[in-house]
Image: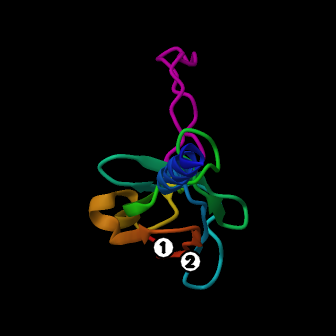
Amino acid sequence: MKHLSLSLVLLLCVLVATGCDRNVKVTGNVAFSDGKPLSTGQVVFENEKISAMGKLSEDGSYTLGTDKENNGLPRGKYRVFITGAVTYGEAPPLPTDMYGRRTSVSPLAPSISLIDRKYLSVETSGLEVDIQGARTYDITVEKP
């Protein structure tokens, strides 16, 4: 009986300890102040130990994941930023040489940021969150 009680206590300790390290589900939406969703890019939560990312859907929603898509992140304090929120203009025409032949170098289309550049970095975004359990974290962004 004594061994059974000790085994149950040890099992309880293991369950409590593993529960503290489990990832929690974090979802949210990113939208402009007029309510229109930001439908391209990624939301990134990071601290000194870990980084989690969620790809934005057409409706502006995201779900965070670390090493696997949508697997959440550990509890803790995070700084938040948004990447890849760009659209592309038209690529300039291919350059030609002095004989009118097109060169092999293809110019890239210019990228245009859809959000204020301050959201592109943890140092300037001003977005911080303390994750202690599953939650929804909605973000309102400004246009450039």
Q: Nearer the viewer, residue 96 or 39?
A: 39
Instruction: Give, as a single range, the part of the protein colored magenta.
Output: 88-111
- From the top left corner, tell me how far across and down residue 48 is, in percent: 29, 49
Q: Residue furthest front?
A: 1
57 relative position to 121: left or right: right
The amino acid type of the residue labelled 2 equals Phe
* Residue at the image point whose x is 62% and y is 49% from the top: 71
- Give the image quarter of residue 45: bottom left
Residue 68 drawn above or below residue 39: above
Circle on res. 81:
none
Quadrant containing the C terminus is: bottom left
The Cα–Cα distance between marks 2 and 1, rounded to whole angstroms, is 7 Å
Chief SS of the magenta region: loop
Q: Nearer the viewer, residue 26 or 38?
A: 26
The amino acid type of the residue labelled 1 equals Lys
- From the top left corner, tell me how far across and down residue 30 is, in percent: 58, 70
Label 1 neighbour load within 10 Å: few <14, some 14-19, many 20+: few
* Residue 68 visible in the shown view: yes
The answer to whether the residues at label 2 and label 1 have Cβ atoms under 8 Å apart is yes
Element type at marker 2?
Answer: strand
Residue 35 drawn above or below residue 111: below
Residue 46 drawn above or below residue 131: above
- From the top left corner, tell me how far across and down residue 65 is, in percent: 57, 49
Q: Which residue is mark 1?
A: 143
Q: Which residue is mark 2?
A: 32
Label 2 neighbour load within 10 Å: few <14, some 14-19, many 20+: some
